[in-house]
Image: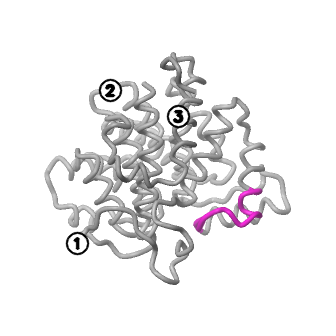
C-alpha cells in the first residue's frame, strides 16, 4: 500500500509541475511536449524552475503534514496558509484563494472563506483520501477543511468527489471513476451529471479535443473535475495521461494534478516516469509524507521505511 500512497502523492505533484507552465494558456493538444518546462516570460509562474509545482501541491503538503502528524485542525491549516501567503511563498493562487488569504489578515478563519465554485480547495482531497480510510469520515473531514477557503456547495462537492475517486482507487474498487461519479451526483447534481457525461464521452471514444470543447478547462469545479475524469478514463497509460493532461490549457495544473494522483494511486510509484521523478521538486519530502499518512491509518509500514 505504501507504493500506492507514494504514487498518489508523487503523481499529483508531477502533474502539477508538468501543468505549471501551461496554467491559463491555450491547449497544446496539436503538438504536446514531454517533460518539465519553464513558463513563458511574463507568466505568473515565470519565477518557477522546470520541475517545480504550484499552490496545488503546496496545499497538499501543508494539509498532509498536519494530518500525518495528527495536528490538523481548521485553525492550524488556516494559520499555515496565511503564513505561506504573507511570506510571499504561495505560488499563483487563484482569485478565490487570494481573497481568502487577504481576509485572513484581519479576521478569523471562520469568516475568511469565499462563495466560489473554483477548484482551489480540491487539492486537499488527496491527503484527506489517504489519511481517512472510511469514505464517510473522509468526506466529512474534508468538507470541514475545505470550508476554511470555500463555502460554495459545488466547490465542496468537487473536493469530496476527487477524494472519493482516490479512496475507491486505493481500496481496489473495480470502477473507482464511476463510483466517484455516483458520489458527485449525491453531492451536487450538476457536477454529477457533468462527470457522468465525461465518462460517457470517454467510453464512446470521442477525441480529446472534442471532449475539451464539450467539457471546458477553466478553474470552475464544473469544468476542471469532469475533464480530469474524462482524461483519467480515456488514457490508461500514466505517462501519456500526464503529458496530455498537463497541456490541455486553462486550469491545467489542477487538472493534471488530479490525473496524476489517480494514476499513481491506481498503479503505484513504479508506474510513474523515473526521469521526471528525479527532477521533481521536494520528491523526498513527498515520499516521507506518504509514509506519514499511511502510518496514520494504522496500516503496517514496510520494514526499515521511515
Q: Position of residue 50 (x, y in %)?
A: 46, 65
Circle 3 Cα neighbour tier, 10 Å, few/some/many (<14 / 14–19 / ≥20): many
Farthest residue toward the left? 205
In the image, what residue occupies the spot 34% across and 42% down? 263
Q: Give the answer, above or below, for where 207 lies relative to 25.
A: above
Disc 3 on helix, strand or loop?
helix
Disc 2 on helix, strand or loop?
loop
Q: Is residue 286 magenta?
A: no
The quarter in which the C terminus is drawn is top right
In the image, what residue occupies the spot 55% across and 50% down? 282
Marks 1 and 3, Cα distance to the nearest angstrom? 34 Å
Between marks 1 and 2 in the image, the one whose residue lies nearer the viewer:
1
The numbered disc on residue 290 is 3
Q: Residue at label 2? A: 173
Q: Residue at label 1? A: 31
| Labelled pair 1, 3 in contact (Cβ < 8 Å) | no
Q: Earlier in the sequence, mark 3 or mark 2?
A: 2
| Labelled pair 1, 2 in contact (Cβ < 8 Å) | no
Marks 3 and 2, Cα distance to the nearest angstrom? 21 Å
Q: In this rendered view, identify the residue nearer to me: 151 or 41.
A: 41
The part of the chain drawn in magenta is 82-94
Q: Give the answer, above or below, for where 87 lies relative to 150.
A: below
Q: In this rendered view, identify the residue nearer to me: 52 or 164.
A: 52
Amino acid at each position: 500500500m505504501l507504493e500506492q500512497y507514494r504514487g498518489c502523492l508523487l503523481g499529483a505533484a508531477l502533474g502539477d509541475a508538468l501543468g505549471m507552465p501551461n496554467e491559463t494558456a491555450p491547449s497544446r493538444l496539436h503538438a504536446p511536449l514531454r517533460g518539465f518546462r519553464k513558463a513563458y516570460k511574463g507568466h505568473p509562474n515565470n519565477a518557477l524552475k522546470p520541475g517545480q509545482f504550484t499552490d496545488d501541491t503546496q496545499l497538499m503538503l501543508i494539509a498532509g503534514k498536519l494530518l500525518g502528524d495528527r495536528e490538523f485542525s481548521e485553525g492550524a491549516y488556516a494559520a499555515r496558509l496565511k503564513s505561506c501567503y504573507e511570506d510571499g511563498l504561495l505560488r499563483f493562487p487563484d482569485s478565490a484563494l487570494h481573497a481568502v488569504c487577504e481576509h485572513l489578515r484581519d479576521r478569523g478563519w471562520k469568516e475568511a472563506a469565499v462563495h466560489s465554485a473554483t477548484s482551489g480547495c480540491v487539492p486537499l482531497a488527496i491527503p484527506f483520501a489517504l489519511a481517512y480510510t472510511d469514505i464517510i469520515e473522509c468526506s466529512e473531514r474534508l468538507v470541514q477543511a475545505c470550508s476554511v477557503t470555500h463555502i460554495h456547495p459545488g466547490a465542496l462537492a468537487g473536493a469530496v468527489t476527487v477524494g472519493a475517486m482516490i479512496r475507491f482507487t486505493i481500496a481496489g474498487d473495480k470502477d473507482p471513476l464511476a463510483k466517484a461519479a455516483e458520489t458527485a451526483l449525491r453531492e451536487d447534481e450538476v457536477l454529477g451529471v457533468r462527470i457522468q457525461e465525461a465518462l460517457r464521452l470517454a467510453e464512446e471514444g470521442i477525441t480529446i479535443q472534442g471532449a475539451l470543447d464539450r467539457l471546458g478547462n477553466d478553474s470552475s469545479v464544473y469544468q476542471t473535475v469532469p475533464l480530469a475524469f474524462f482524461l483519467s478514463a480515456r488514457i490508461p497509460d500514466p505517462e501519456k495521461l500526464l503529458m496530455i493532461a498537463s497541456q490541455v490549457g486553462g486550469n491545467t495544473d489542477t487538472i493534471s494534478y488530479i490525473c496524476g494522483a489517480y494514476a499513481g494511486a491506481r498503479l503505484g510509484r513504479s508506474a510513474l516516469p523515473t526521469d521526471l521523478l528525479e527532477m521533481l521538486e521536494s520528491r523526498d519530502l513527498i515520499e516521507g509524507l506518504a509514509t506519514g499518512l499511511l502510518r496514520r491509518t494504522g496500516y503496517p509500514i514496510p520494514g526499515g521505511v521511515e
